[in-house]
Amino acid sequence: DGSDTTSMDSGKNNGVNLEVNGDSDSNRAGALRTVYFGFNSSVIDGDTRDALNGNAEFLKTNAAVKVQVEGHCDERGSVQFNLALGERRAKATRDYLVAQGVAASRISIISLGKEKPVSFGHDEESWSKNRRANFVVTEK
């Protein structure tokens, strides 16, 4: 009956909000989490590595999901510099996930430089939130 279908559907994504064009910045990309970087860095370390390990497990468990990794920077630096840095962050994120066993064909990248901040202050607290790579679901 209909209730069986409903319960199967609700369990399909284990209760997480996963939608096409949903993103990790707004918690609409399932269990995928945005990762953060140090100033002028694209190095994967510490908390970033932990979050990416979880993202890799989610992607391996949900084999139909494809994502776009968006590389972002804080407001400091030129447009060209930040586009290049955002690309390095997105590539480092993708390469880490591929090394964890996620197919490269499931991950596209783009750099948005400093064009899409999530925090609008002009201090380290805001800047640290904008130095990130987030995930957008392109297929599920």
Image (tube, rainbow, N blue to C red):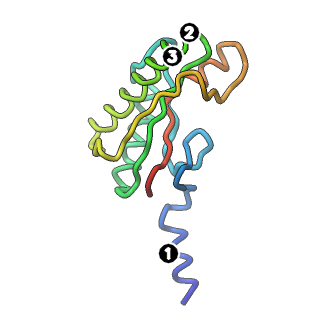
> Which secondary structure lies at badge 2?
loop
> Which secondary structure lies at badge 1?
helix
Using a 10 Å C-alpha cutoff, classify the residue at mark 3 as few (fewer than 14 neighbours), some (14 to 19) or many (20 or more).
many
**Discs 3, 2 touching: Cβ within 8 Å:** yes
Q: Is residue 9 above or below residue 73?
A: below
Q: Residue at x 54, y 76 (%)?
A: 7
Mark closest to the chain's N terminus, 1 or 3: 1
Q: What residue is shown with label 3? A: 82
- Residue 92: x %, y % from top left: 36, 26
Which is in the foreground here, disc 2 or disc 1? 2
Q: What residue is shown with label 2? A: 77
- Residue 23: x %, y % from top left: 55, 44
Using a 10 Å C-alpha cutoff, classify the residue at mark 2 as few (fewer than 14 neighbours), some (14 to 19) or many (20 or more).
some
Q: What residue is shown with label 1? A: 8
Residue at mark 2 to residue at mark 1: CA–CA distance: 49 Å
Residue at mark 1 to residue at mark 3: CA–CA distance: 44 Å
Looking at numbered disc 1 in the image, what kind of residue is underneath it? Met
Q: Residue at x 39, y 19 (%)?
A: 43
Q: Nearer the viewer, residue 3 or 24?
A: 24
Would you say 57 lies left or right of 34 here?
left
Q: Residue at x 65, y 30 (%)?
A: 118
Furthest toward the bottom, the residue is: 1
Looking at numbered disc 3 in the image, what kind of residue is underneath it? Asn
Which is in the foreground here, disc 1 or disc 3? 3
**Discs 2, 1 touching: Cβ within 8 Å:** no
Furthest toward the right, the residue is: 121
- Residue 82: x %, y % from top left: 51, 16
Q: Residue at x 41, y 35 (%)?
A: 109
Q: Nearer the viewer, residue 67 or 15?
A: 67
> Which secondary structure lies at badge 3?
helix
Looking at numbered disc 2 in the image, what kind of residue is underneath it? Gly
